[in-house]
Image: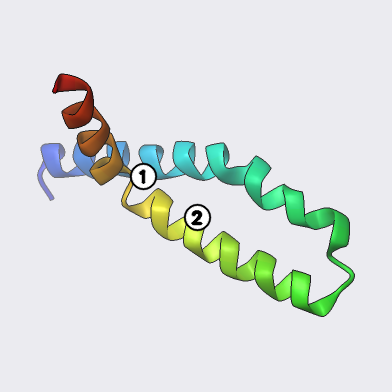
Amino acid sequence: MSIWLWVALCAYLVGVAIEWHRFQPQIKEYDEYSNFPIVWATKQIVACGYLLRALVWFYSFIYDADIEAT
């Protein structure tokens, strides 16, 4: 594997980790009521949604930069 591919992969994974860490307070909001099964299931679905948003962090980064430029 090329060194530049390795650097790009590491940078992407660091970005995912940063975004996931940023979303933790929103996910923790459901902990207060986690003894109810429907709230637990909702928390799992919300966490999966935030994980998907963290995996595509670069799209929001580019989109936000494009909005600020106009």
Residue topped by disc 2: 50
Q: In this view, does 48 lie above or below 56?
A: below
What's the residue at 76%, 56% (across, down)? Answer: 30
Circle 2: residue type: Tyr
Label 2 packing within 10 angstroms: few (<14), some (14-19), many (20+): some
Indicate the position of residue 25 as horizontal and vertical percent values: 67, 41
Of the image marks 1 and 2, the number of the one nearer the N terminus = 1
Q: In this view, does 14 lie above or below 34?
A: above
Between 9 and 44, the one lying in front of the other is 44
Q: Is residue 13 above or below residue 55?
A: above
Residue depth check, mark 1 versus mark 2: number of the one nearer the observer:
2
Residue topped by disc 1: 13
Q: In this view, does 15 lie to the left or right of 1?
A: right
Indicate the position of residue 21 as horizontal and vertical percent values: 56, 39
The part of the image, by quadrant, that contains residue 14 is top left
| Res 36 label | none
